[in-house]
Image (tube, rainbow, N blue to C red):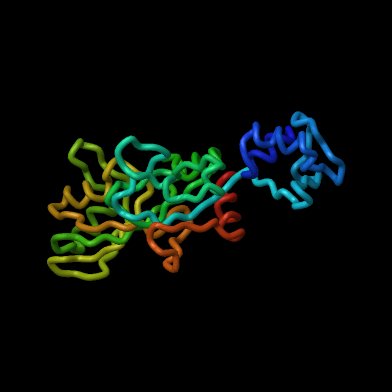
Amino acid sequence: MRLDKLVSNAGYGSRKDVKTMLKKKRITVNNKIIRDGSFQVDPAADVVKLDEKIIHYEKYIYLMLHKPPGVVSATADAKDETVIDLLDTAEKHFDPFCVGRLDKDTEGLLLLTNDGELAHELTSPKKEIEKTYFAKINGTVTETDIDCFKKGVVLDDGYQTKPAGLRILKSGEDSEVEITITEGKFHQIKRMFQAVGKKVVYLKRLSMGGITLDERLPIGTYRRLTEEEQSSLETLKK
């Protein structure tokens, strides 16, 4: 890997900035001053330092975001604030993107990464990755609805969803439920309840692919996944 690419990707400035650092003899590899940005380094074996401070190179980044409502799941948007706008510069330089998406008015767990292979595994319909949501429903959710969701619901466009798990947490005219799906059609959960004559008034994603939202994480903030959480996701790539 080129030295200038490693330093830049580690968040220490643009390639132009790194070129200046090299000229000023601020960067060393294995304690030797290097002035050539094309110098090849092995991130796993070589010790790269800037002003005697070791640069820890990361190829991938994995973030858990507690998405707030009103923010869109996109890397850029001409009109609305995006989830990327919520990140600090230290994370933005990795060019992370959303793993799947949440509707603008939906809150909860959203994973961000620059690991394309992992993102594909988590969003591929063939993998049937489980995603669990908490929802408040205008209308009484019944055992009949549970059976209907278990078989798959026919949406307004004629598509029949895959079987979904539905659990009633609070019954009555304003029901509260947990629902688990393995696909991600447009506004799917809202349309599923619409198909059985009810309306979703609040929706929050709780988990995805075995990763559960850290409830200690304030809405609108994020953290890096723990090593244990990353390991559980890595198994999906094998």
**Image label count:** 0
Q: Is residue 229 left or right of residue 58?
A: left
Which image quarter: residue 34? top right
Report the side of 147 relative to 219 (left or right): left
Name which residue lies at 79% across and 30% down.
36
Which residue is nearer to you in this view: 54 or 24? 24
Q: Position of residue 225 (x, y in %)?
A: 55, 57
- Using residue 119 as the reference point, say whether residue 159 is left or right of it: left
Q: Quadrant of residue 185?
A: top left
Specify the quadrant of the image occupied by residue 67.
bottom left
Q: Extreme right residue here?
A: 32
Q: Establish if 169 lies above or below 10.
A: below
Q: Residue, x 56% and y 42% (percent of image)?
A: 94
In the image, what residue occupies the spot 78% across and 40% down? Answer: 42
Q: Camera-side residue: 188 or 16?
A: 16
Camera-nearest residue between 44 and 22: 22
Can residue 207 be seen in the rendering of this structure?
yes
Residue 192 at x, y = what percent?
A: 22, 49
Q: Residue 149: x percent and y percent? A: 26, 53
Residue at position x 19%, y 69% from top? 171
Q: Which residue extends farthest front?
A: 24
Looking at the image, residue 17 sits to the left or right of residue 169; the answer is right
Q: Does residue 151 show up?
A: no
**Quick one: quadrant of the C terminus?**
top right
Residue 21 location (% of width, % of height): 72, 38
Q: Quadrant of the N terminus?
A: top right
